[in-house]
Amino acid sequence: MAQNRTPENMKTVPAFRALKNHSVIISVALILAFASWSSDQQKRSGSTIEYTVSMENPNNHYYQVSFTYDGFKEKSIEFKLPSWTPGYYMIMDYAKNVVNFRAVDNKGEELPWEKTQKNRWRVNSIRNGFVKVSYEVYSFRTSVADPFLDDGRGFISPTGIFLHPGGKKSHPVTVTVIPYEKFPVVSTGLEPVPGMTNAFYASDFDVLYDSPILAGNHEILKFELNGIPYTVAAENLGSIDRSKFIEDHKKMISEATAVVGDIPYKHYTFLIMNRGGGGLEHTNSMAVFASPASFGTPNGYRRWLSFAAHEFFHLYNVKTIRPVELGPFDYDKENYTTMLWFSEGVTSYYENLILNRAGFFTRQDVFNDLRSAIANYENIPGRLFQSAAQSSFDAWLYFLNRSENSLNTTISYYDKGCALGLLLDLKIRHESGNRRSLDDVMRTLYNEYYKEKSRGFTDKEFRDVCEKTAGKSLDELFDVYIPTTREIDYAKYLAYAGLSIDTNPIPQPGGWLGAATRQEGDNLMITRVEWDSPAYRAGLSFQDVINEVDGMKLTASQLEEKLSGLKKGDKITISVTHREIRNTLEIILGEKTIRSFEIKPMADPTPQQTAILDNWLR
């Protein structure tokens, strides 16, 4: 990422170049129509905020941004840029990419300004209730939470692009995108402005910040479902049958929306980019990365459908069904919650249910994915140190800042949350006599808190809804399994649906050292040391170079082969170097065990167990 090129000691000096003139001709009639429409839409605020974003030389990776703020009374205004993006729990400090900040009045005369905090610019001595601000944003990090620009794609992640007046997040706003001359298509979930090309409207800044924009050469597929329009804006779908792609997504959407029974958007857009990774949910859209290979094989397409179902269901679970801490957002700092295990992990659980109900997943497919989620965190040391609630709260520290020690001390709230969703669902079904399920919890939370109260729910309110739905106290889940690292009795909960689970430790062949390695040229580097392993107890460390093992220089594959021929209790002598310090260590090998957590139907389930399984999974 490029650093802000505006020196701090120049912050009040208006010696910045103006934005280049745009070679775009807009008719006077359209300008007047747009101004009239914008004024009508924003009249409740008594003022207007109108943005223009262009991308004149995309391979320099700078967006040119300007906006006018007209009709206000203040003489000094502090403009703020978010420090993070909702759904991407990491402080991004987007302000470091802003350069050439400039402010002028309605006569084009320079206004003095100063930087008051890392993401705030205060414009002073404003006259006549009008200010025009312009700046550029360096955009060359490929992620769903960062703006990106080159001559192949313009991805506008709004939190990294649009300043807002402090205290005015509820103000309506319009955005006009002037794409690079070789970008014929602009796609977004925002509302289009009538009669204008590439002009969009947001009722407030929360909506704007929740609505990414993609400009480029992407393919457009359109379809309707139950009278609601959908757009697929995809950079490269490969050779997949487009008709099948649309029909499959209709099935996924139908089952996902059926969980709650209400749709909170007027239209929805899938923004699918290639040459990247990850995805981010929005109420009116999703922004995801997927290579053409994702669609070209049965397994790849299955993974894509899981990915798409996950991000799509987030428009309920996290965007509308949400912990109270997750909106309205404070964009300046971390927004902590202990419930990402529910918002993210239970969404992972629902992607399996949705695809099973849509006919894409068999029961065994669901069992396999649930088994994998459980094994992912139960077979790492982090399960001993971090609960689901702690993992949620500390997402800002760990989840997108993984280190060589992460598996030793942390877990994924996606994985454990998925497992907790399974336990919660089966418990509710069992205690209610198979009359209610986690679906009822989702509907209640949506209707009572999003629709009726227009807010999120507290931890207590969430628990109350779950227990009322089950008709019984859920102490074990809420007092033990969610907030602590206590061992979970999976067998008890899965038995409610007539299922068994293998939790027996399985010894792995060979001698266990507990150090992962990678070959780097002639050096055999240690990349991770597992907590309480023989390597850990002997003092081996990340970034140690293994010089010799039992007097021989080995490669990574040769070390693996050597360990496979040894057993618990055997000794090896390892010579290592770190920071020019050389040590020779004698290590007694251990035995590694893992648990498979394989899920299978019981041989003789009761009628109630069979009924729960049949009602749960098709």
Image: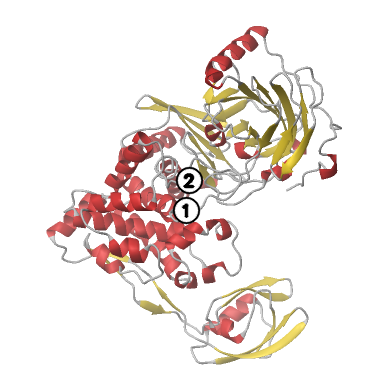
Depth check: 148 or 303 in front?
Answer: 148
Q: Up-down: is 103 above or below 400?
A: above
Q: Is residue 537 left or right of residue 449?
A: right
Q: Is residue 475 visible?
A: yes
Amino acid bearing label 1 = Thr
Q: Element under label 1?
A: loop
Q: Up-down: is 256 above or below 567?
A: above
Q: Which quarter of the figure has residue 593? A: bottom left
Q: Is residue 202 left or right of residue 162?
A: left
Amino acid bearing label 2 = Leu
Q: Is residue 511 left or right of residue 2?
A: left
Circle on res. 326: 2
Who's the residue at 80% across and 31% down the image?
Answer: 112
Residue labelled with disc 1: 337
Q: Position of residue 273 (x, y in %)?
A: 58, 40
Q: Is residue 178 visible?
A: no
Q: Residues within 10 Å of mark 1 (few under 14, many from 20)?
A: many
Depth check: 32 or 539 in front?
Answer: 32
Who's the residue at 33% across and 59% down the image?
Answer: 367
